Image (cartoon, rainbow, N blue to C red):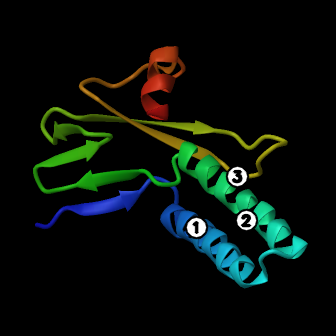
Amino acid sequence: MKTKRFNTVPNGMAIVITMFCLFILFVIVSIPLFPKAEAFGLLAFSLIFLIAMADLIAKKYWNFIDVAEDHVSHNGKQYSWENVYITIKCHQPTFARNAFEYYVCFDDHYLTEEECDSKAMKKEVST
């Protein structure tokens, strides 16, 4: 079986690519306008898309889980199916976001709620 690659955020890769294309589009449109002030305005506006793209990458929109017949891997760590335990944690919607968020943690044992909320696990998930 071929390795299947799943994005951790649905359509996350398409969103990041769209932001990059918008950045490039605004840069290309601004080139013929030089040295007018509109060109500098378009370049400044294009930075918004570049910053948004960097923020999306930092929020793991460009993050993948690779699933094969004999193993699963994420962030360079590979777990065989015999030794992997998958713990899923759900966060309720808040005022800032109106959707449920699900976090999947791979480890060699099932994680307790305290382990899921620990600083070490949050650091590992953010890398």
Q: Front-most of 5 and 112? A: 5
Q: What residue is at 24 percent from the left and 55 percent from the top?
A: 67
Q: Which residue position holds label 1?
A: 20
Relative image position of residue 60 (x, y in whole percent): 51, 47
> Which mark, by number, is residue 6?
none
In terms of sequence position, does the residue under pointer 1 or pointer 2 come before the other? Answer: 1
Q: Quadrant of residue 120?
A: top left
Q: Front-most of 46 and 15? A: 46
Q: Which residue position holds label 3?
A: 99
Relative image position of residue 62 (x, y in whole percent): 47, 54
Q: Secondary structure at mark 3?
A: loop
Q: Residue furthest front?
A: 35
> Which mark, by number, is residue 46?
2
Q: What residue is at 44 percent from the left and 19 percent from the top?
A: 112
**Gap in Å between the C-alphas at discs 1 and 2?**
10 Å
The residue carrying pointer 2 sits among few (fewer than 14), some (14 to 19) or many (20 or more) residues within 10 Å by Cα, namely many
Q: Report the mark closest to the observer, 1 or 2.
A: 2
